[in-house]
Image: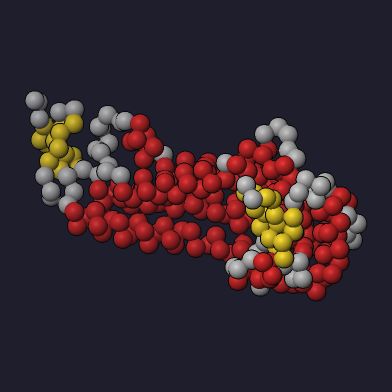
Amino acid sequence: MAGTVYYNGQEYSQRSANEGLAGYFLASAASGAVLAPAAIPSYFAQKQLLKEQINNAQYKDAFIKAHESSGLKAKGVKIIEAQKEFGSNAFIKGQNAAYIHSPAGNVVYINTDKISCAGFHELGHAMNNLMSKYGVKYLQKARKPCYAIAALMEYFAIFSRTKPKGAPRSFTDVIEDNCGKIAFFAMLPVVAEEAIASYRGYNLAKKAGLSKTLLKNVKKMQGTALSTYIAGAALGGLAVYTSRKIMDSFTRPKPAENRYYWG
């Protein structure tokens, strides 16, 4: 052992640096294993995007109509053709689309020749940002802080120094003890904003005159895409919780048997 520490009259044996290092590697590996299934919904979403390219002409026509009829075009939201003006291969290949809000303007980056069906959801994000009531726009503004908090919880899970169970708990100790729950709840605003964007995007597609069959496909694709965020929130929280439990078992000081310190 690496020494002793005293809390409330009880002597505890501290853990060695080698134990902490072993816990770190095991916790990191376990966290990655827990998160791995989150990629499954993304795979099916990409598969659905590829499948819908055959109907892209109809989606594109409805997408352009929705852009104008929604009032977003009048508010200055531009559609930027990814294959012409955006450098990411994922956008150029039609594997992703995005709504970007910045001081330079509001734009939807998308390859309309391949995945116009994904554009309705991005218009939904734009509506959340520019045309929302009841605080929905604040859900979108909270996205980056939410991601940052969730990532910070993994830091607490792995790198915080664990006190004995009987030790007085500080504010940071409470965060450490509940880091898995905090990581999960931090992502719920992101999930909620994504769901609202999908709902609004679907209604835009419907109002633009998309057929019932294609509307059903849009709904299916949006549901699959939303499940990636749900899985990310749930598995992300579980991964942080798992990391913390493993680090606890390797770093939390153990009570020394039948030995007490009375000061």
How many callouts does the rendering have?
0
Q: Is 184 situated left or right of 197 in this image? A: left
| Residue nearest the observer in this picture, 224 or 151 | 151
Hey, which quadrant is residue 260 in on the image? top left
| Residue nearest the observer in this picture, 187 or 22 | 187
Who's the residue at 62% across and 49% down the image? 102
Q: Is 65 situated left or right of 185 in this image? A: right
Who's the residue at 26% across and 51% down the image? 250
- Residue furthest top as drawn: 263
Hey, which quadrant is residue 231 in on the image? bottom right
| Residue nearest the observer in this picture, 255 or 121 | 121
| Residue nearest the observer in this picture, 112 or 171 | 112
Q: Is 95 situated left or right of 260 in this image? A: right
Q: Is residue 222 visible?
A: no
Quadrant in which the C terminus is drawn: top left
Q: Is residue 175 visible?
A: yes
Q: Is 6 situated left or right of 114 in this image? A: left
- Residue furthest front as drawn: 104
Residue 247 pos. (x, y %): 31, 50
Q: Is residue 262 above or below residue 64?
A: above
Hey, which quadrant is residue 160 in on the image? top left
Residue 12 pos. (x, y %): 16, 39
Residue 157 pos. (x, y %): 36, 47
Who's the residue at 58% across and 64% down the image? 40
Specify how the rendered protein is coloured.
secondary structure
Who's the residue at 44% across and 53% down the image? 239
